[in-house]
Image (cartoon, rainbow, N blue to C red):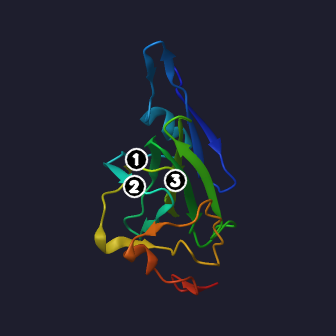
Amino acid sequence: MSRRLEFIPTSLSGLYSINRKPIKDQRGFLNRLFCAEEISEIGLKCPIVQINHTMTRQKGAIRGLHFQNTPYTETKIVTCIKGKVFDVAVDIRKNSPTFLQWHSEELSENNHVSLYIPDGFAHGFQALTNDCELLYMHSEFYQSAAEDALNVLDPRLSIEWPLEITEISERDSKHSMINLFKGIEI
């Protein structure tokens, strides 16, 4: 099999940048977004059960930092198919040496990079251009009762958003700041 995906480990264990290797010619390109056999090498053992497509209209807008609680934790593979985003994953695994540390990647329609986000991470992004579109592949079905989030402006996280924030949903802006995280004082 021709390998079309290259997995680059980040400083946060289990979190990978995926460099896709498109096949190009004068007509354009073919780009593999997912291969179960290749991705199983970095830990995805369950099937992708849901694929979501989002569009964020305004440059500077932020979405996140979302996750689902046990038993509905999920692995995500995030790909930008239009525009450019500053994509962020935060380690929320309580016993991890990198607990509450974050990693960012620039994802764009041109750089052929995706982010593999395993269970135990919160995810969000900031649009760096207008009309950004992302594809999310999920290993678990969405469960509204399990939905949770970190506040994108929490000073304990100190995320360095690259642009002035132009828009954030009312729901995302109301997530509480970290004082206690799931019963663990930090």
Q: Which residue is mark 1?
A: 133
The amino acid type of the residue labelled 1 equals: Glu
Q: x, y (%) of residue 48?
A: 36, 46
Residue at 48% from the left image edge and 63% from the top image edge: 62
Q: Residue furthest top?
A: 26
For marks 1 and 2, the one nearer the N-term is 2
Location of residue 87 (image quadrant): bottom right
Can the viewer see residue 127 in this picture?
yes
Image side of residue 55 versus residue 163, left or right: left
Image side of residue 76 versus residue 186, left or right: left
In the depicted view, which residue is nearer to us: 64 or 118?
64
Separation of marks 2 and 3 at Cα, in angstroms: 20 Å
The amino acid type of the residue labelled 3 equals: Ile
| Secondary structure beneath label 1 | strand
Residue at 36% from the left image edge and 45% from the top image edge: 47
In the depicted view, which residue is nearer to us: 96 or 176?
176
The amino acid type of the residue labelled 2 equals: Thr
Determine whether 184 is above or below 53 in the image: below
Determine whether 178 is above or below 94 in the image: below
For marks 2 and 3, the one nearer the N-term is 2
Location of residue 159 (image quadrant): bottom right
Q: Which residue is mark 3?
A: 117
* Crowding near the residue tagged with mark 1, few <14, some 14–19, many ≥20 C-alpha atoms within 10 Å: many
Asked if disc 1 and disc 2 are in contact, CB closer than 8 Å, the reply is: yes
Residue 56's mark?
Answer: 2
Can the viewer see residue 1 in this picture?
no
Image side of residue 186 versus residue 177, left or right: right
| Secondary structure beneath label 3 | strand
Determine whether 166 is above or below 85 in the image: below
Q: x, y (%) of residue 157?
A: 63, 73
Determine whether 59 is above or below 36 in the image: below
